[in-house]
Image (cartoon, rainbow, N blue to C red):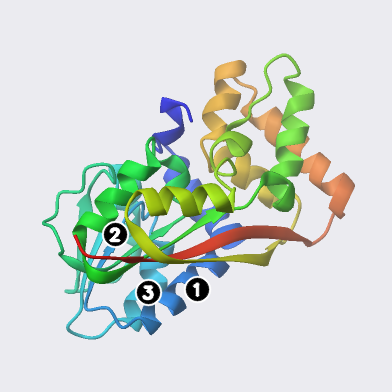
Amino acid sequence: MLEADKIFAGSIPENYDRYMVPLIFEPYAADIAQRAGSLKPRTVLEIAAGTGVVTRALAPKLSSDASYVVTDLNQPMLDYAASRHQPDGRITWRQADAMALPFENAAFDLVVCQFGAMFFPDRISAYREAKRVLKSSGHFLFNVWDRIEDNVFADDVTKALARIFPNDPPRFLARTPHGYHDVDRIRSDLEDAGFSEIVIETRAEQSRASSPRIPAIAYCQGTLLRNEIEAREAGKLQAATDYAAAAIEARHGSGEVAAKIQAHVILATAGEA
């Protein structure tokens, strides 16, 4: 992962929430919220919350006396998440780095993270931090994307951009969001961090959009892929988006489109400190 793969700023948060969230994140947020709610946690920490899709799904499932701390490394994403959420006295919004969480040991029953672990520069260290702030027998619940070939629109866009920029293909999607998919490695990293009772489930969903243009805008302008496109040729973002949309249309049709997305959902238990 490159350092630039972590900076969600400018218009990216709004485009991310408008396009990416309904395209690929909502079904997994509903799944994470259901799993989290079934654990009946009283104290919850969410890391890498993004624009708050899990927060919106999980908050209604928590008890009235629960405490829910929602964090993200990027203040613009967190600000956008807070702006989308109704006032809720149980929720505290706080900028925080998953690599150095500003919380006491054994403070939470549950740490939850949707599609954030791929961005951690040192995942074992981040997992140790999650374990540190968990109570004994608390749970770490998170998900990561499977390989890009099992996430069709992301793969379509990546291949289309490689044709536009053959000398320097933008590889953000393959490199980072879809770069941490080996379940044996995930399990090993968690074990190295001190977690036990690790359960990993691979879950396929459908990504749906009203037109092929939607996933093209979502990936090209609502993710850090935008920065890679603009870095290669100033003013090329719209043309690149148009080209990606045409590639999706050629493969999936000009009307409503649907394609497979796939992720791993992981639940790990914290042992004694």
Residue 224 spot, x, y in % from top left: 51, 35
Residue 72 spot, x, y in % from top left: 31, 49
Q: Identity of the amino acid at label 1?
A: Ala
Nearer the observer: mark 2 or 3; the answer is: 3
> Mark 3 or 1 closer to N-term?
1
Callout 3: helix, strand or loop?
A: helix
Question: Which residue was labeled with disc 2?
Answer: 82
Q: Is residue 221 left or right of residue 157?
A: left
Tell me the residue at 13%/58% (across/down).
105
Tell me the residue at 63%/44% (across/down).
217
Q: Where 78 falls versus 265 (above or below)? A: above
Separation (CA) of disc 3 from disc 1: 8 Å
Image disc number at residue 30: 1
| Total numbered badges shown on the rendered structure | 3
Q: Identity of the amino acid at label 2?
A: Ala
Separation (CA) of disc 2 from disc 3: 14 Å
Tell me the residue at 61%/17% (across/down).
232
Check disc 1: other Cα within 10 Å, few if <14, some if 14-19, many if 20+: some
Residue 96 spot, x, y in % from top left: 23, 46
Q: Identity of the amino acid at label 3?
A: Leu
Q: Nearer the viewer, residue 102 or 51?
A: 102
Q: Residue at the top extreme?
A: 167
Question: Which residue was labeled with disc 3?
Answer: 58
